[in-house]
Amino acid sequence: MTEPWWISLIKAAVVINLLLGVFAYTTLLERKVMGRMQLRYGPNRAGPFGVLQPIADLVKLIRKEAFTPTQALDVPYIVAPVLSAFTALAAFAVIPFGEGWHVWRWDVTGQIVDVPISLILIFALGSVGIYGFIVGGWASESKYSLLGSMRTCAQLVSYEVSLALSVLGVVLMGQSLSLTEIVEKQGDTIWFAVPQFIGLVTFFVAGVAETSRAPFDLPEAESELVAGYHTEYSGMRWGLFQMAEYVNMITLSGLCVTLFFAGWHGPWAPLGPLWFLLKVAVILFVFIWLRTTLPRLRYDQLMAFGWKVLLPVATLNALVTALLVVAID
Amino acid sequence: MAIAPERPEIYAGSRIPRIPTVLELPAALRDSDDVLQVNFGPNHPSTHGVLRLVVDLHGETVVGLNAKVGYVHTGFEKNMEAKTWWKAITYAPRIDYLAYQANELVFVQAIEKLLGLPLPEKATWMRMLLCELNRIHSHLVWLGTAALELGAISMFWYCFRERDQILDLSELVTGYRMHTRYFQAGGLAEDVPPGFYPECRRFVETMPGAVDQYEDLVDRNQIWLKRTKGLGLLSADDAIALGQTGPVLRGSGVDWDLRRDDPYLAYDRVDFAVPVYENGDVYDRYRVRMDEMRESTRIVEQCLRRLERLDGEPWIADDRKVVLPPREELHTSMESLIHHFKIVTEGYRVPEGEVYVAVESPRGELGCYVVSDGGPRPWRVKFRGASFVALEATATCMVDAYIADLIAIVGSLDTVMGEVDR
């Protein structure tokens, strides 16, 4: 028997809380890893090894004044962070973290909802989430925010094209848009990271740009635009933007694991969701590593790279894959 | 969005705007609604201190620029006129807080020139050593912050690792980590403490490796090269016309270094090269500073070799009218007690006259003009600051620049606002 609605609801509650937990500890991981890479300790005061730091941060953010500039357009100003955070969290709903289990008399799937077009859903939600960043910066009525918004607009829209194109190869090889089926296919044959290596690289690069992480952190380039689109935000509204950014990063890592690293399958030992988590953690580590190492690109270089390098490579990859899939069939 | 500006290798003719510090809006954009005026500073994450740049933006392109200074004006020069000569020394290092040793040196040298005091051998070499350590320190802070502004955040901590060693050395020898006030008219305030030479030698041995590490991290990084090469151009002629000195001038291909061309202390007795690069862009200024760190390390090493043989020699001139008598003499000698009392209360008198002394600070020619009316206080003190002059080149360098370049270019000029505003 397939699962009833209330099981999905329980799963949603569990996953959303887990996701928020992972988000909180990603911030700690980032600060710790960056600290170590930069000859520092990172946070180590709140609790042993600083493990309570995310909680302290949360309490601080909630208690802070949520400041609104007088000139800001109230409704979009408040809605923007909520929208970003919502879409970021919602996108994770379709990412499969396990094979699915048989509990009593129900077949419980390994994600919150199994949508046959889950890949498209994730990109759609991502595109809506971008509006949060754009509108937030625009509604703040600040020049820095406006510039940040402009950059977000240009960057995220440009790189989304490459991001979508880079997974086309995987879709062709998996012959499905359902993430569960793509993972199953990889479990049966080979991890797509091997045949789709170029796809993986373009996906990852476009993904870093899509989550506006260094070296593509132009929308919030601190040394240039103070804080970009969220310059005028404070308190938990700012926290929601941060949450959206980190959750997007986690979702993207999850998607990367699903598409290229066979999701919950491991090289040995059927640990299921643990493999998934481990792989996500490794990819998150790479995100952080990049941030500590690389300088930031300039706006025109970013655009040139996106349109002149990444997009042709992604297109070519999809094209060659399509030809090969047809030829082998 | 504006079309990507073309980036020529180096330009011909002069690019200096009508008012050198102001880049005026092109006539076509003057009444346009597309131009956004933004204040970068005086409070902004990337400005060094409190520089305020009023920038006109057309999309991401910088089309107008107006640099405003004066936010940390504290009246150092005027204050120094109200203090006795030996108390005024304390003010000098605080003007340029990254090149404190050079500032101290230039003022002390001005006093010595007026007094005609000879400098003992040990003081000469120790001053050189500390000034070169200070040059490395200043360049390290520059490299760290400039890289931070371009987004390479980790460089900051790597640079500060070595910087901290220099500050430790400074603490060991002078008792202070910065603003040491170790140079005294006639020599040094104290003898070099035992244990300094081996510690310093250890630093000299590790420093070249550290510079290699920095280069490994950024110099072959495509993003770094793309962000620094071919932008912020300043031709040799423009650099001279704008009175540039130091790494900015040498990065534009002019071979000029006061340490070699107008030697002071004992720079004519050490072996070092003056790095010169031709392209006049941000990258070449970076290269000059990297090479200078290596050369400074070599100078420090040569100073050390000399100093180790000068153990037990005097560190300050033997002139009781200017130099404080040794502490132990105060209990036994009436003359010493009187001298001590006179110097501490009234201060020593400096003969009437005026001098201009210039040294090569990490930022270029640092000059000090001093007038004495023969009294215990300077009648007029005026500094010629290299960063103030470097800031005048901002508008000239800013042709065809994006916002991100603006940050890189202002960073590459290495201005210290304390010295600009004084």
Image: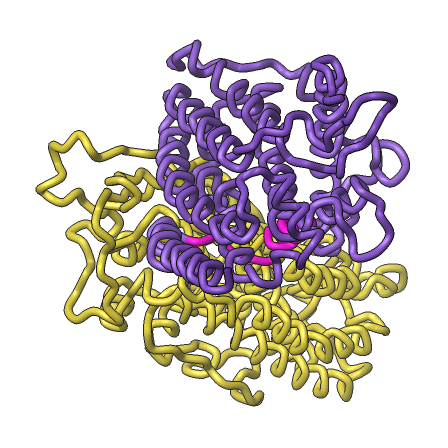
Predominant SS along the magenta part:
helix
Q: Colour of chain A?
A: purple
- What range of the chain is rendered magenta? A285-297
| Residue at horizontal 70 percent and vertical 44 percent from the top | A30
Residue B317 pos. (x, y %): 67, 74
**Chain painted yellow:** B
Q: Nearer the viewer, residue A7 or B374?
A: A7
Count every numbered label the image shows and give the total: 0
| Residue at horizontal 61 percent and vertical 42 percent from the top | A255
| Residue at horizontal 51 percent and vertical 71 percent from the top | B219
Quadrant housing residue B102: bottom right
Q: Residue furthest left?
A: B27
Residue A325 pos. (x, y %): 49, 59
Residue B284 pos. (x, y %): 40, 71
Q: Is residue B208 left or right of residue B312?
A: left
The N terminus of chain B is located in which quarter? Answer: top left
Residue A239 visible? yes
Asked if the magenta segment contains residue A300, the reply would be no
- Against A322, residue B59 (above or below) is above
Q: Is residue B261 left or right of residue B290?
A: left
Asked if the magenta segment contains residue A287, the reply would be yes
